[in-house]
Image (cartoon, rainbow, N blue to C red):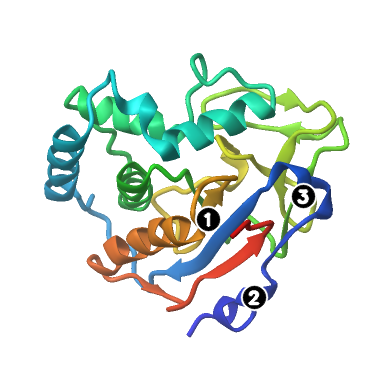
Amino acid sequence: MSIYCVNLENMLEVDESVRELGIFVVYTVAWSENRMDVHISFESEIQDLINYLKSRYTIENLKNDAIVRAYRDFFWRIGIDPTKIRPSSEALVRRALRGSFPSINEIVDAGNIASAYTMVPIGIYDLDKALPPFTIKLSSGGEIFRPIGGGEDVLGRGIPILVDSRGSVMHIYPHRDSRDTAIDRDSKKIFILGAGVPKVPKDLVDEAVRRVVNLLEKIGWNWCRNTIARGFIKS
C-alpha cells in the first residue's frame, strides 16, 4: 500500500474562504509500479463512450442537462462566461458528439473518459511534482499560475484555486490545470480529484473518481481502494 493511502484523509483541506461557493471534492491516490514504454490505448472505451453520449445527447440539448447547468451556473458565479469558456467536462462531451475525442496518454485519457460519462470535471496531478497536503481556497492576489498550454498568469484576488504545501498553484477551480504538476509519460504516483459544485450530487463526483481508477486498474495500476470527500456538501 502507498504511504499516501495511510494519510489519505489528511491530503486535502477545503478552506472556509470558499464556503459560500459550495465547493466540494472527492479524491484518491493511484500508482503504478512499472510504467510501460509503449502507448496504451483506450480506443474501444472511447468508442463506447462516443456511442453512449450520442444515444443520450445532441449538441442542441446538452445545455439542458442538469449537471451541465450546475457547472455553467457555477462558472457564471465566479465570473466566467460558460458560453465562451466551457466547463471541461462539457467541452469533452461536445467533442464526442461531433465524433472525436482527445487521446493524450493513458492517465489523462482515463480522466477524460470518466469526466465525459459523468459530466464532472476531473483533475489529475503528479505526486512527484506536487507536495501534499493540498488546499482549496480563494487567491490572495499575486499568485503565479502556469496553465497547461499557456504562458504565465498573475492571479487577482478571490479566485478559487488548489495549491500544494509550497504554495504552488496546481489548479484554478474547476477548469484549468498547471503544467507544473501535470501528468506526463513518466508519472507513477497521481492524485485524482473530482470537482463538485452546488446541485451536483456527491455520489456522482465519487462515481467519476472511481471510473478513473477502474480504467487504470485495467492497465495494471493500483489505488487506495477508498475515496475521501471534503468541502461544503449540501444534502
| Above or below, 160 relative to 16 | above
Task: Locate residue 190 relative to residue 170 in the image: left or right.
Answer: left
Q: Which residue is mark 3?
A: 19
Name the mark nearer the viewer: 2 or 3.
Answer: 3
Which tag, 1 or 3, sits closer to the chain's start? Answer: 3
Name the mark nearer the viewer: 1 or 3.
Answer: 3
Front-lying residue, 213 or 40: 213
* Residue 133 % position (x, y): 72, 65
The amino acid beneath tag 1 is Leu
Task: Locate residue 68 relative to residue 109 in the image: left or right.
Answer: right
The amino acid beneath tag 2 is Glu
The amino acid beneath tag 3 is Arg
Q: Would you say residue 129 is visible in this rendering?
A: no
Q: Would you say residue 140 is visible in this rendering?
A: yes
Q: Please tell me in which quadrant of the rendered image residue 52 appears.
A: top left
| Above or below, 173 relative to 36 | above
Which tag, 2 or 1, sits closer to the chain's start? Answer: 2
Q: CA distance from mark 1 to mark 3?
A: 18 Å
* Residue 215 % position (x, y): 28, 61
Neighbor class of circle 3 (other Cα within 10 Å; few <14, some 14-19, many 20+) is: some
Name which residue lies at 44% across and 47% down.
184
- How many numbered badges does the structure rendering display? 3
Which element carries disc 2, helix, strand or loop? Answer: helix
Which element carries disc 3, helix, strand or loop? Answer: helix
* Residue 85 % position (x, y): 52, 20
Neighbor class of circle 1 (other Cα within 10 Å; few <14, some 14-19, many 20+) is: many
Q: Which residue is mark 2?
A: 9
Q: Which residue is mark 1?
A: 193
Instruction: Tell me the quarter of the image containing the C terminus.
Output: bottom right
Q: Please tell me in which quadrant of the rendered image residue 51 appears.
A: top left
| Above or below, 216 relative to 224 | above
Name which residue lies at 33% across and 60% down.
211
